[in-house]
Image: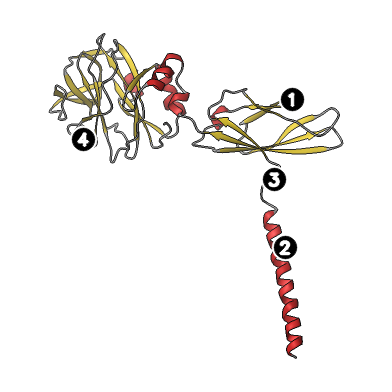
Amino acid sequence: MKTQFIYQLCFYFSIALLVSCSSEDDGNSNEPSDNVITINIDEYPSSGDLITTINSNLEGNLNYSIAFETSSQAAILNGNELRVGDWLAFDYETNENLFVTIDVSNGSETEVLEYKIAIQDVDDIWAFLNGNTRTAYEDASPGEWVWITESEYNNLFNYLAETSKSGASDTQLFNNNSVQQVTGGKTFANANGNSMPMDHYFFAFKYYSWSSNAASNRVKLSETSAESSFSSVGEILPDHDDGFNHFVLKGADTKTMSEAFLGLYASLKIGAKNDNSSSYNLGGGNTATLDDTVLGKVLLQQGLSTSLKQWD
């Protein structure tokens, strides 16, 4: 009886082992195949850039079609060339990898090719700068403000992930009211309720200078209120002329710990507009405390921030 029991136990153990192996095989059937072709590409390529040329083992006149892709229109076909379609899909912060399946057919046979496009992270600010501006950014040290163009500033807001504007709104900046001069030598901050969110990196700034050869200006931030506790962010702004000027901060690495308020110490005259829904605070010199208030006007100054650090 003991021997028979042992035989039965071995039989049931063998069946259990076979079922277990079968279950493991079934689980692996949904895993990517070992034939996936990996391609590395830097984020933010241009639409139309070549990703890869498709090589098939089939003979004859071949037709190529996209059977599957993780982001619609991220990749497109031009004959046997796989090219960038929607370049915004190639954002490392959104998609670290994109997967594309290509069907190749000669009419009687079909070959399935699977591609993994591994997106390589780059400095997102650098990616949206051009020419001399990009060179200046590359050469800058952490904490330096770099002068950029208006279009570059707008691209940073439009294309970096999770960005926010604080200070003057676009409506306030570009309404039809005329720009008025405000005497410099003071620290200024809008009190219009448009603050910087908590847990954000402050990385870009714009303002209207009434004066040419503006120097010694300092961008400021308070995490207390629009009237007090302002401290400088980064180094002195580069010398610049009148009109709207745009800057980006190299190496911003500190998040706001609470709601924050944007400020500016301006050594010379700056611009403001009439706005019944707004006011601004000011204090003499390069100061942390703004004791005076001007009603019915908005300072033409704005900051960009994001909850994600997307640069070196």
C-beta proximity under 8 Å, tags 3 and 4: no
Q: Is residue 154 above or below residue 55?
A: above
Q: CA distance from mark 3 to mark 4?
A: 57 Å
Query: Is the residue marked by circle 3 packed among few (<14), some (14-19), or many (20+) residues within 10 Å?
Result: few
Q: Position of residue 287 (x, y in %)?
A: 15, 26
Q: CA distance from mark 4 to mark 2?
A: 65 Å
In this picture, residue 5 sits left or right of residue 286:
right
| Residue topped by disc 3 | 34
Q: Tell me the residue at 46%/15% (across/down).
A: 131
In this picture, residue 245 sits left or right of residue 308:
left
Q: Position of residue 258 (x, y in %)?
A: 28, 40
| Residue topped by disc 4 | 225
Q: CA distance from mark 2 to mark 1?
A: 42 Å
Label 2 vs label 3, nearer the camera: 3
Query: Is the residue marked by circle 1 packed among few (<14), some (14-19), or many (20+) residues within 10 Å?
Result: few
Q: Position of residue 67 (x, y in %)?
A: 71, 37
| Residue topped by disc 2 | 22
| N-term mark: 1 or 4 | 1
Amino acid type assigned to the residue bearing label 1 in the image: Gly
Nearer to the camera, 140 or 71: 140
Extreme-bottom residue of the structure: 1
**Mark seen at residue 79:** 1
Q: Tell me the element at label 3.
A: loop
Amino acid type assigned to the residue bearing label 3 in the image: Asp
